[in-house]
Amino acid sequence: MAGFTASWVHGNAVVQELTQIEDGAVLSFVHYGWGTQIRMRPGFSRWFHIPLPTPVMLDGYRMKLIRAFIHIRHIGAVQFEIRDVHLYDGPHRVAAQSAGDFTAPPSVSIPDCQVYELFEPRVCAFGAGLSFNLAGIVSFDGLVVDERSNPWIVVSSAGADFQIA
């Protein structure tokens, strides 16, 4: 397809919002060579942000953001939940999962990736960013999770697909 490109960033570019809050939601947040490893307390959530390399122009034409990806998985039996996803173009929020801006199901899939495909691609003027609200799940098979079994969540990359506007 002419005028199409994909751009990805490594998972160790993830940052957490409100790092100064000591509510115990994030028990560990560490960057490694394989990505960012997050340990969440079940029942709590936190916003995380990751920049998406954005080719705003290609051959003199503006680019449209088609879809975004998060390569995310958990280690151990306890899982996580992504409660909301927002896409930004610079300071402007252009899409939100909670606002119903993404298709279901998306037209593409990649193993271990959450895919957020826009109903309507958005023209990019600045740099794109992906924000996601991540939560540890409170129970597993009806049992309350104790602190010894808090999930390790690994974000190893994030990316986006763009096409000529």
Image: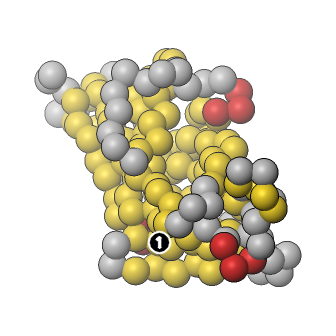
Which quadrant holds the N terminus?
top left
- Residue 62 appears in the figure: no
Location of mark 1 (residue): 36
Q: Quadrant of the C terminus?
A: top left
Instruction: Please determine whether, in this image, residue 142 is positioned above or below residue 98.
Output: below
Place of residue 52 in the rendered image (x, y in percent of width and height, measured from the top left): 41, 52
Quadrant in the picture for residue 26: bottom right
Query: Foreground residue, 162 or 117?
Result: 117
Relative to residue 45, is residue 85 drawn left or right? left
Residue 148 coordinates in the image, percent (x, y): 69, 79
Tell me the residue at 40%/28% (across/down). Answer: 66
Q: Position of residue 83 (x, y in %)?
A: 69, 44
Task: Give whichever of 77, 56 is nearer the camera.
Answer: 77
Horizontally, residue 41 falls left or right of residue 78, namely right
Between 31 and 110, the one nearer to me in the picture: 110
Q: Tell me the SS state at disc 1.
A: strand
Colour option used: secondary structure
Say which quarter of the image contains residue 10: bottom left
Q: Is residue 7 something one can see in this rendering?
A: yes
In the picture shown, does residue 45 fall above or below 97? below
| Residue 2: image location, x then y, percent | 14, 23
Compared to residue 161, the image places residue 132 above or below, namely below
| Residue closest to the far left | 2
* Residue 32 placement, left or right of 96: left
Q: Residue at x 64, y 33 (%)?
A: 97
Relative placement, left or right, of 27 versus 4 is: right
Question: Badge 1: how crowded within 10 Å, few (<14), some, or many (20+)?
Answer: many
